[in-house]
Amino acid sequence: MKQISLRRFQTSAQHALDGVLDAYRSQRHMRVHFVFMAANAILALVYKLNALEVALVTIATALVVSMEMFNTVIEAVINMVCETYHPVARFAKDVAAGAVLIAAGNAIIVALCIYASPGRMAYLRSVWVTGDFNDAAAMPRAVAGSLVLLTALLAMLKVGRIQGSVLRGGVISGHTAYAFCLATCVFFLSEGAAYGILAGIAALVTAVLVAQLRLHDRAHRMRTTFYGAALGVAVTWIVFGLLARPMTGP
């Protein structure tokens, strides 16, 4: 019974992700919204937003994307049932578009209140002058930044092609990319610590096992698996180099 429930949940999750994928592929506005979501996530790391600010930004951007998806559904249903122009259909489309506009305006106001405050602007100017991103939270921010940037890149790579689905197949192995991203994070986090080398080796072995499992299940070929591993390592290396590099003076 548990196995059947898990299988049903996986199937439902796959259909839901495919819905997001189809909306991203077919709607230009959805692609723009996802770019802004990734930019917001990166800015949240750079500006060192607190938990409440991150929650507000996340809710605002998620609301815009959700409204855009509902707008897409309404337009698709109307186009399916109405073969000719009808004023009620036009009214429904306009109302749906208005909902997206209100959500987008709300997101802009939230972003301006958080990112354009005097304190945030002063911090950004100091970072621009000194080049110092490092602080006590540099490592956690670097890990989060690596995962966010990797997710954005994988989304652009996987949804740009028709082959495969979100969880299986495609031009690059997302599972392998995440595995090697986390393994590289462990390498940086354990640097200089006791048993750091052993932790790095264990993480690398785990990532290799994930890659081998994707090949064994024939979810990916050797080439796409290698691309995933290379992308995961490269993204993490770059982000840690930017957000967790040694501190420099003014």
Image: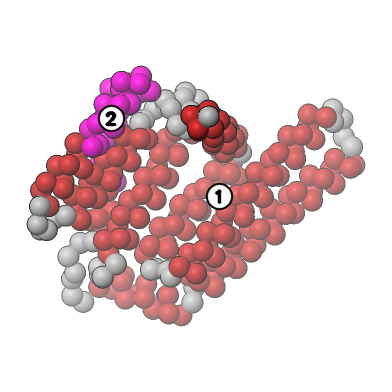
Q: Identify the residue under disc 1.
A: 33
| Disc 2 residue type (three-letter) | Ala
Q: Nearer the viewer, residue 190 or 35?
A: 190
Residue 109 relative to residue 219: left or right: right
Q: Is residue 21 visible?
A: no
Q: Which residues are magenta?
A: 206-235
| Residue at image coords 85%, 40% | 89
Q: Identify the residue under disc 2.
A: 211
Image disc number at residue 6: none
| Residue at image coords 60%, 45% | 29
Which quadrant of the figure has residue 131? bottom left
Image: 240 above or below 118: above
Residue 153 relative to residue 159: left or right: left
| Predominant SS along the magenta part | helix
| Residue at image coords 43%, 79% | 119
Residue 141 relative to residue 198: left or right: right
Mark 2: few/some/many CA within 10 Å (<14, 14-19, 20+): many
Q: Position of residue 158 (x, y in %)?
A: 44, 33
Q: How many marks?
A: 2
Image: 130 above or below 14: below
Residue 75 relative to residue 145: left or right: right
Image: 95 above or below 158: below
Image: 183 above or below 163: below
